[in-house]
Amino acid sequence: MLSIIDTMSTINVIFESTSHRERAAWLHLVAMTISYGPYFTLMSLDPPTAPLPDLRTMSAFAATVVVQIIVLAVGHAWLALARPAEAKAPADERDRAVELRSMKIAYLVLITGMIMVGVVMPFSSSGWKLINSAIGAIVLAEVVHYGLVIWSYRRGWSA
Amino acid sequence: MPSPTSERRITNEIRTLRFLNGEMTQAELGERIGLTRQSVAAIEAGKYSPSLEAAFRIAEVFGKRVDEVFHWENDAYS
């Protein structure tokens, strides 16, 4: 019983000290870890060898996307129910500044990944290796994006 | 001689001014200037430098000039 109260109290403290957008960024990081973590672990332990489209790998990717969508949907619903006013509030200038900077840096990661996958890798790779590298670049860019959002809210940010 | 600008921080008197204005909460101040409570807290703690517009709005709420609310650290607050 006490641990439930402690947990609720901890959640309340976290909610008090974080903005809705920071909580959402944490949620996106958790959703990506839960979904793409097992996917890339599976792909590295048992790389796809069958020719495209390879239904087994396609199914694994489809399951990954479904898990990500479910975690995000449930998480966003919970965040909105916990603090409805904060969830509905429009982004203020700090939120926009944090988002802009995080997106700018994540874009550099994404464009670098896409150049590697679309220009460099086709000379030596093909099939799911290429596709997974593209997915990996997108996931990495998203991790950088949400990681920077959290870092900016936590550590502060000046223009 | 003042140190180079990059080494100096801007600090503010928002906490004091909130106290002097009937313990105005961060949420109340945020509502009046169009910022979230967390953004007001970040400005107050020096973790975020507000836009010039927001700085003017904050000063206006307290009936002060901008330089009475925001100033270089260690500069005398007049």
Image (tube, coloured by chain):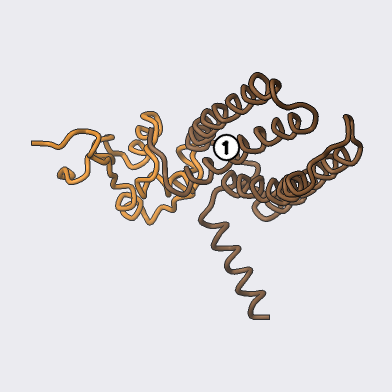
Chain colours: A brown, B orange
Percent x, y for residue A89? 61, 40
**Residue located 65% across and 19% down the image:** A119
Residue B5 visible here: yes
A34 to A147, vertically: above or below: below
Q: Quadrant of the C terminus of chain A?
A: top left
**Residue located 59% across and 36% down the image:** A90
Percent x, y for residue A81? 71, 53
Percent x, y for residue A13? 54, 63
- Depth order, front residue of A21/B62: A21
Q: Quadrant of the N terminus of chain A?
A: bottom right
Q: Which residue lies most toward the front here?
A: A124
- Depth order, front residue of A106/B70: A106
Residue A73 visible here: no
A24 to B57, vertically: above or below: below
State the SS at label 1.
helix
Left or right of residue B32: residue A90:
right
**Dot 1 surroundings within 10 Å: few (below 14), some, or many (20 or more)?**
many
* Amino acid type, label 1: His
Which quadrant of the structure image shows residue A55? top right
